[in-house]
Amino acid sequence: MTKPVFRFAPSPNGRLHLGHAYSALLNAELARRFGGRFLLRIEDIDTTRCRPEFEAAIYEDLSWLGLAWEEPVRRQSQHFDDYRAAFRRLQGRGLVYPCFCSRKDIAAAVACREAETGRTWPRDPDGAPLYPGTCRSLTPREADRRIAAGEAHAWRLDMAVLRNLLPGPHGYRRFERDGREEAVAADPWRWGDAVIVRKDTPTSYHLSVVVDDALQGVTHVVRGRDLEAATDLHVLLQALLELPGPLYHHHGLVLDPEGDKLAKSRQSQSLAELRSAGVTPQDVRRRLGFEAHPTPST
């Protein structure tokens, strides 16, 4: 039998905090428990925000925690051709369309719809308004003209087409730390016409992560509950691209004293800052429960 493969996949757009430490430690622990492999992947498709010093800090922080991973480390910015190939498969089947709308355009269109109907426009799992389909109605000729003119555009999944092609039901397998598994229903339609290739890079988080997991043979995806809803969309992409579906475990989040999840955007205390304050790796492990019951605050 193939060994289970786990991966920790941070983005080098800031310093790691305790939430990252928990996810990395849990992946490594489960890889040991299941007799599997532990990979590190650098998710750096955002070339404007990701910086070499943050990537170097990831290696430093994880080594400080006592973690070791297989080499070489996969860096997404070195594999854009893999994501382009996957996108071309979707494009060739007529499953995507170009979108020239800005966030301001989308907000204005949604506000207009809400004013017309007197109802709140539906939101996706991240709380953003579902795309109202403005560019879906463009003729191929008009879309090609705008692309040829150099107009910035993203590419969206055409969920109206996909509902007919793959109506479902959709789902995935969830696993627990003791190895038990269960089936979970997935609802990719709640994402609306999701962006699959961004304007500023030839891929997206959703596309690159399913391609990477397949290429690296990842069998067990362990990540936070804040990404649980994204799994619904990933299941759909795996079906469209004929990729294997890993088992999933969405762990609880490490929270700050106010009950909010730790985040780089909120400048949560970093592992480097804890290290400078005299905190040891053993202190971090105890704080996160890895000497007794590895469950963070939820």
Image (cartoon, grey):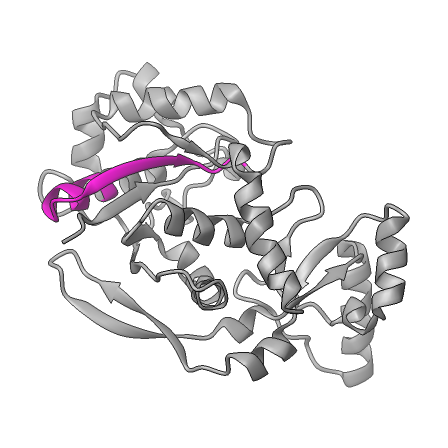
Q: Nearer the viewer, residue 145 or 221?
A: 145
Query: Residue placed at 21% from the left, 40% from the top?
Result: 37
Query: Residue placed at 26% from the left, 65% from the top?
Result: 174
Q: Quadrant of the C terminus?
A: bottom left
Whether residue 289 is situated above or below residue 100 in the rendered picture: above
Q: Nearer the viewer, residue 223 or 164?
A: 164
Return the x and y of residue 211 as percentages of the image width and height: 46, 51
Return the x and y of residue 112 as percentages of the image width and height: 83, 73
Disc count in the image?
0
Query: Residue placed at 50% from the left, 18% from the top?
Result: 53
Return the x and y of residue 229 as percentages of the image width and height: 44, 64
Residue 259 visible within the image: no
Q: Nearer the viewer, residue 35 or 231?
A: 35
Asked whether residue 98 is drawn in magenta, I would say no
Horizontal arrangement in the rendering, residue 29 relative to residue 248 (left or right): left
Return the x and y of residue 285 as percentages of the image width and height: 19, 33
Residue 207 visible within the image: yes
Asked whether residue 36 is drawn in magenta, I would say yes
Horizontal arrangement in the rendering, residue 218 relative to residue 43 (left or right): left
> In which quadrant of the rendered view does residue 276 lie?
top left
Whether residue 206 is situated above or below residue 76 in the rendered picture: below
Horizontal arrangement in the rendering, residue 189 relative to residue 200 (left or right): left
Horizontal arrangement in the rendering, residue 31 relative to residue 128 (left or right): left
Q: Quadrant of the N terminus?
A: bottom left
Q: Which residues are magenta?
A: 27-44
> In which quadrant of the rendered view does residue 56 lie?
top left
Query: Residue placed at 61% from the left, 74% from the top?
Result: 159
